[in-house]
Amino acid sequence: MGNGTVCQRVQDCQDLYDNGVISEGFHLIYPLTWPGEPFEAYCKDGWTFFQLRVSHHGLFYGWDLYRNGIRRSDSNSHWLGNEKLANITAQRDYTMRMEFRNSSSNITHYLQYDLFRIGSEVNNYALEELGSYTGSLEYDYMRYHHGVGFSTYDSDNDNSTSRKCTQPHLAGWWYNGYDNFTCTTANFNGRYGEPWKAGLCIYDRERMIADCDIAATEMKIKPL
């Protein structure tokens, strides 16, 4: 700055990739509306990850940790942080991709949406935008969560009138529960190896079938 050079902010991992930073891993980014110092995000091929689970640890944490971010010291497993994610998705239009690997078959499935945005903390980091779905699975497992606020055990923002969805599911997520029966159809922050409810599972509401045979997950965004 002292030599008159204007430094452009690196808004996300795509900016890094476009400028030749192609190595996979944690890199500093600096979203346009972010008020603090640059922070680390996990990058791969221009994708900015906001969730990566490769170690068998649950994510049953409170509001502050999900807002600020959760990162395992023994692996790359992390939740970027809702405040960071809200600032990133406020600056551009993004596509969002979710992937999970089946434990038994080792097959990786994906769900992709052509628009993704979450709101600010004032709006409970609600899943405000979720575009059209394409993927390797017939059922759209995230549609049920569109428009719903984020919930943790100490901040109940689901639509259920009879219970707190975080109690049976033991994670932070965009839990719905408007029918007072089904809280989630994609519990990507649930516990490894647990059955439906507390487990890391997906759930087909139409056929009432749960799949909890999941070994690893990731959620990531890229500018349109």
Image: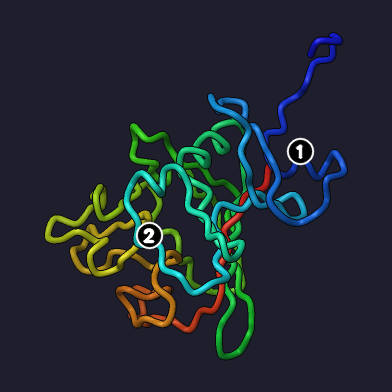
Question: Which quadrant of the view contains residue 82?
Answer: top left
Report x, y in % for residue 64. Answer: 36, 44
In the displayed structure, 148 sits above or below 216; it is above
Frontmost of labels 2 and 1 is: 1
In the displayed structure, 169 sits above or below 11; it is below
Looking at the rendered structure, the kind of residue marked 2 is Tyr
- Give whichever of 104, 28 is nearer the camera: 28
Q: What residue appears at the point 32 percent right and 73 percent down from the top-left corner?
A: 198
Looking at the rendered structure, the kind of residue marked 1 is Asp
Question: Of callouts 2 and 1, which one flags the residue occurring earlier in the amino acid sequence?
Answer: 1
- Give whichever of 149, 49 is nearer the camera: 49
Q: Secondary structure at mark 2?
A: helix
Q: Residues within 10 Å of mark 2 (few under 14, many from 20)?
A: some
- Give whichever of 152, 39 is nearer the camera: 39
Q: Secondary structure at mark 1?
A: helix
Q: What residue appears at the point 65 percent right and 32 percent down from the top-left corner?
A: 30
In the displayed structure, 180 sits above or below 35; it is below
Question: Which quadrant of the view contains residue 186?
Answer: bottom left
- Between the residue at mark 2 and the residue at mark 1, the CA separation in whole angstroms equals 32 Å
Q: Which mark is residue 144?
A: 2
Q: Residues within 10 Å of mark 1 (few under 14, many from 20)?
A: some
Name the side, left or right, on which 22 lies relative to 76.
right
Residue linked to disc 1: 15
Report x, y in % for residue 144. Answer: 38, 59
Question: Which quadrant of the view contains residue 176?
Answer: bottom left
